[in-house]
Image (tube, grey):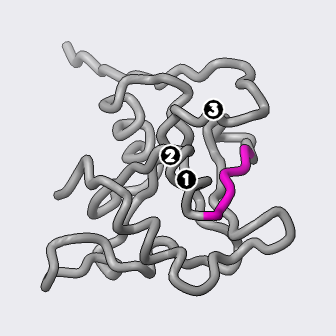
């Protein structure tokens, strides 16, 4: 007799439209964007012309946030930064849910500009904390 186990990560039907200042934003890190010399993500982790894709925590346990991200893509690492810190660094966090990811959000340069400019990617990288590494 074979026993097949499967599980599904459940998601709420909807979240508040505003990301709270004390929520964390989780960003997957590819191996290409890992700075081995300094043992940290490169600032390229936070550079994307389409917006820096992140998952908001919505007060989930950190392990649940990590597991959810890894269920989508096998990231080399995952880092997190608090929404308040993003604001202090003059960037914004926008809640932009997707059909298959209610937690999906993005970090943008401003209300008018999507891609982070100048030293913002480096400053956000420096303020982030690596919470998972292969």
Residue at 55 percent of width and 44 percent of height: 84
Residue at 30 percent of width and 71 percent of height: 41
Q: Are marks 3 and 2 in contact (CB under 8 Å)?
A: no
Q: Which mark is residue 42?
A: none
Residue that mark 1 sits on? 54
Is 71 situated above or below 7? Answer: below
Under circle 3, the secondary element is loop
Q: Are marks 1 and 2 in contact (CB under 8 Å)?
A: yes
Nearer the observer, disc 3 or disc 1?
Answer: 3
Q: Quadrant of residue 60?
A: top left
Nearer the observer, disc 3 or disc 2?
Answer: 3
Q: Is residue 9 left or right of residue 101?
A: left
Residue that mark 2 sits on? 25
Rounded to the nearest whole Å, what is the CA distance between mark 3 and mark 1?
14 Å
Please provide the residue range marked out in magenta.
90-95
- Mark 2 Cα within 10 Å, few/some/many (few <14, many 20+)? many
């Amino acid at each position: 007799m074979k026993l097949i186990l499967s599980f599904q990560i459940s998601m709420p039907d909807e979240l508040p439209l505003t990301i709270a200042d004390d929520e964390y934003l989780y960003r997957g890190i590819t191996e290409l964007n890992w700075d081995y010399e300094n043992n940290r993500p490169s600032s390229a982790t936070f550079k994307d012309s389409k917006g820096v894709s992140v998952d908001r925590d919505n007060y989930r346990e950190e392990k649940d946030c990590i597991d959810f991200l890894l269920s989508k893509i096998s990231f080399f690492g995952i880092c997190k930064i608090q929404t308040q810190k993003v604001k202090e660094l003059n960037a914004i966090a926008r809640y932009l849910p997707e059909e298959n990811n209610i937690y999906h959000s993005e970090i943008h340069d401003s209300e008018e500009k999507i891609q982070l400019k100048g030293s913002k990617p480096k400053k956000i990288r420096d303020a982030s904390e690596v919470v998972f590494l292969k």
